[in-house]
Amino acid sequence: MLNPGFQERVNTLQGAGFTVAQQPGGSVRVSRGVCAVDLKETGGALQVENRAGVAMGGEIAVLVDGGFQKFFRASSGKKKPALADELQALHAFEADLKEKLGLQSLYNEGLGTVSTLYQYDRVKDRDRGVPKRIWE
């Protein structure tokens, strides 16, 4: 059996209830509800540009674990706290997307939502002598 092409995979996603929209630069934004991810064709193969996240003002905000709380952060710097409903939706979105595209699903990702970044406030700058205190 031949590997399906990029457009065939995009059509499969549309048929599975995902919304697909062309983006500048040749990428395709796939979304469902508040969740979205950008896909791109590279040499005839499908490439996921970044982890899936929540759509915020035309951007995709990725999940960041701050140690005390998870939140979504867009590339412009906008942040918002992650709500339980959004985390559940993101987990289901990623699982369904991987299933429809025939991508590898890892065990730890199957257990729950995986953050893109981990930024614990007590670890930040610890290798540079005395770290700046939160109140400074």
Image (cartoon, grey):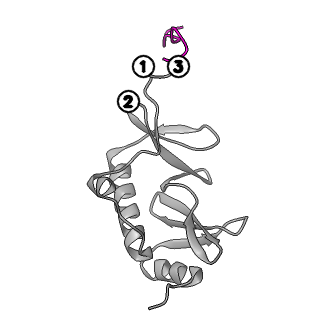
Horizontal side, residue 48 vs residue 41: left or right:
left
Label whose residue precedes the other's in the sequence (3 or 2): 2
x%, y% of residue 13?
47, 77
- Find numbered disc 3 in the image and state the secondary structure of the residue it sits on: loop
x%, y% of residue 22?
65, 71
**Image: 125 above or below 110:** above
The local crowd at label 2, few if under 14, some if 14 to 19, many if 20 or more residues have their Cα within 10 Å, is: few
Horizontal side, residue 77 vs residue 90: left or right:
right
Magenta segment, which residues? 126-136
- The Cα atoms of the two marked residues, 3 and 1, are separated by 8 Å
Asked if labels 2 and 1 touch by Cβ distance under 8 angstroms, the answer is yes
Amino acid identity at mark 3: Asp
Q: Nearer the viewer, residue 9 or 72?
A: 9
Measuring 49% from the left and 38% from the top, which residue is drawn there? 80
The local crowd at label 3, few if under 14, some if 14 to 19, many if 20 or more residues have their Cα within 10 Å, is: few
Q: Quadrant of the C terminus?
A: top right
Residue that numbered label 1 is attached to: 122
- Find numbered disc 1 in the image and state the secondary structure of the residue it sits on: loop
Amino acid identity at mark 1: Arg
Residue that numbered label 3 is attached to: 125
Residue that numbered label 2 is attached to: 67
Measuring 62% from the left and 44% from the top, which residue is drawn there? 75
Q: Say if the magenta span includes residue 54.
A: no
Measuring 48% from the left and 17% from the top, which residue is drawn there? 126
